[in-house]
Image (cartoon, rainbow, N blue to C red):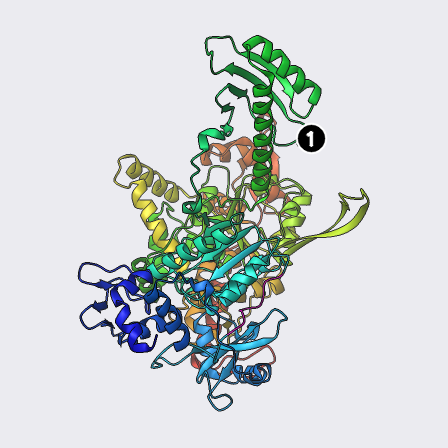
Amino acid sequence: MDIAQIKANVDIINIATELGLQLDKSKKCLCPFHKEKTPSLQFSREKQIATCFSANCDAGSMDVIDLVKKFYSWELPQALKWLESKASGSNYSIVDLSMPKSIKQDYPEIFDNLKNKLGKSSKAREYLKGRHIDYKKVEAGFNTGKDHHELKYCIVFPLKNKNGEITSLYGRSIYNNAKSKHYYTTNRKGLYPNYPNPETKTLIITESIIDTVTLQQCLPDFFDSKENQVLTAYGTNGITSEHITTIKELKQLQEIIFWMDGDNAGEAATDKYAKDLHKLLPQITMSKIEMLENEDINSLLDTHEPEILQHLYKGRKTIQSLKVKSKSLKETPTLQIKENHAVYEDSYVKIELMGRVDLKDLSKLKVTTVIHNVKEPYRTPSRNNADLYNDDQVEKLIRKTADKIELGTIAIREAMDKVTRDLEVYRLQQQNQTQKVKKERYELRSVTLKEQDQAKRLLQSKDLKQTLIQKLQQTGIIGEEKNALFLFTILLSRKMPRTLNAMVQGTSGSGKSHLIKKVADCMYDQNKIKRFTRVTDKSFYNYGEYDLQNCGIILEDYDGLTEEAELAWRELQSNHKLSSSVSQKNELTGEIATGEKYVFGPIASLVATTNFRIYEDNESRVFVIAIDESEAQTEKVLDYMAKKASKVITDDQEKQVIQELQNVVYMLKPSKVKNPYRLELPKTTKQRRRLTQMLHDYIEQITLLHQYQRQQESGLLITELQDLEIAIELMFNSIVLKTDELDGILRQFYEDLKKYVEKKGKSYEFTMREIRQHFRISKTQMFRYFTELQELEYITRSGIGARNMHKFQVCYWDNIEKLRQEIREHLTNQIERYKSGTQRNSNGTLLERSRV
């Protein structure tokens, strides 16, 4: 047929239906050539054309030939051949259509030349960066149009044959005004990224090359194995005969996963190709990824963390519609297995298995059976125990049962054989299931566009610090405003390049655990927040290599850590990894050899402790703050409790605010920071070198918190003086504690003691009972306070009174407020000099004012 005859013998409406387009009563449908929620593609039977009226689409008006060409990304001969088959009633499949012979071109040389141009084009780099792709890690080039006549102004990707040779090219236009976004060299052939490895067991099929590159960069662990591969379809209708042939040759293939876009075209393509491939490979499991509506793999990264891809992959679903219902199901009954009970029933016998199936030891198959005669149900069933892997026991059971229920041994033997085979399959399936990645404990909540906009506006607000403090108070954190925000930013650092750690000191029942729990609740993706009440000696070493990477660790009682656990904790904090030399047994030969085991960080952590003194090597790695245990703070907490009890404040209100803060955390992205300022701590500060580094790391964290308000330079966020001021304000108490000889809990008690004594005269002598009763402190706690203060020579035993009661005096009257003022002035003066442009470094050289 010629073109006129083809047009005369096909109807565009029927062809649209053949293509899987769903037309409404007005002959409208969702346009497959751009993303939309409202139908804009209008069909006309009278004019035999289809027209897209969306301003976002370049399809325009198309006749039936143009429609098929664009829909399948075909050349004219392919489209005519397919339409001719429809006009003549021939049963051609898309898989059957062969590609025209390619025009010989030296594509390897062309691509090698274009590859060198990618890094030199700022527009190409910016485009890939906007698509969350690292141009240094992708095999691609850029064509300005000067080096090759096809694929002009495109980022170019190579398509390869079975030998890994480049046979044609794909181009993705980076210009918004381009007529199309997707281009191929003449007579396209080859696959992307390459032909799958022959050892492939799991194959992912994506809709576009950009999606494939995104998966490769965001799921590197998945693609480390030769058994896991990805293959790109050339659009929703672009699985060619080359794809099909390649897939059929994968002899070890077990599962095909369709990861198409979350639109109607993607759903239709998944259904169509899953059915086609299932007919060819009925033994292969067909699965699909359930995508968010109108999203593709790459666009998900605009609004979500990369972890969502792993989450979606783990939640893939088997395509149930492919399972063919057999008419002979009643003739081939199967064993129905529940937790403690399994039943098999055919026309002659009913076998019940009582109790659980042993899934651990596969070398035996012990069961307790209750066997009934189906034809004569009134007979007493036969009850027995047997190992189905012991032929003697099974044969004895069959003969004994046959005599009791008066049924032939052949029927019972066939039923027992079927039960045994079904149990074997069940046990192997359960074993495989347990070996898969553990299911996430918390479902990853999707953040809607509206929630993202609200969170972004909050992050752009000028009073961000105060707003976050108010939000944290509304979650149930009372009276610890600055400490709460300080800990919030510390834990937030778990997703950033440099992580931070903090320790909260307080007496028992002071609310330290409540504080860190509430802060942890405000983190997005609770699967990345690990909460422990106890840690055994080796537990950290037994995690998988990347189980703790970029996690936030909450330890409610640091005092319970053993020396071995503390060592692991320190290494994760400072070196960001644990390394062990371990003995490993070869399961095949039984030989034992030395191997290496790693657990990688980094981690951010919040821990609570009641200890005054922490081992110096542990304390030097963390920020330390003390819980406010004053009477005024107690009254605030009691008032909040009363409001909760009277339902003035409800749990739902707290949960709503927690979700808002989670949205804020979700919107913050990791980034590198350039800090042009240097701050020096007082020389009296303990561990001055390490604390100075921690101070600058925390300033970076404050800059990251304000990333929606900060300028960027070469991809780096630029720290402003406001970040220094906020950082110092929030971590000031921690700096003071590092400078002070007394720890936070002890300092609070000592200040209260001095006030009490000063009212009675500085030379006043007091007893331990007197102070204990005045401050309502337990005898054990008071003894710890007095012992510590005596060792540090802040109080002294002055004599013995009646009934041998020891008397004490304050012998050292320090001035903590003066110390705090000196530290604050020391830091504030440095910032003021930066503002005036007169700050000098340690050598006396004048530092330039920041050009931010």
Residue appearing at x 45%, y 55% in the figure: 276
Name the kind of residue labelled 1 in the image.
Ser
Q: Is residue 191 magenta?
A: yes
Is 11 rendered above or below residue 170? above
Viewer-closest of 743 and 127:
127
Which secondary structure is most common in the magenta stretch? loop
Is 504 rendered above or below residue 238? above
Residue appearing at x 79%, y 50% in the figure: 594
Q: Can you name the residue that lies furthest to the bottom here? A: 146
Whether residue 264 is visible here, answered yes or no, is yes
Viewer-closest of 668 and 610:
668
Q: Quadrant of residue 430?
A: top right
> How far across and down, in percent of the image, does residue 202 sit?
56, 54
Q: Is residue 779 left or right of residue 446?
A: right
Q: Which span of residues is magenta-colored?
A: 189-197
Kindly state the secondary structure of the residue where label 1 is placed: loop
Viewer-closest of 741 and 341:
341
Q: Residues within 10 Å of mark 1 (few under 14, many from 20)?
A: few
> How far across and down, in percent of the image, does residue 497 sit?
54, 64
Q: Which residue is mark 1?
A: 363
Q: Is residue 249 left or right of residue 392?
A: left
Residue appearing at x 38%, y 48% in the figure: 479
Is 347 rendered above or below residue 697? above
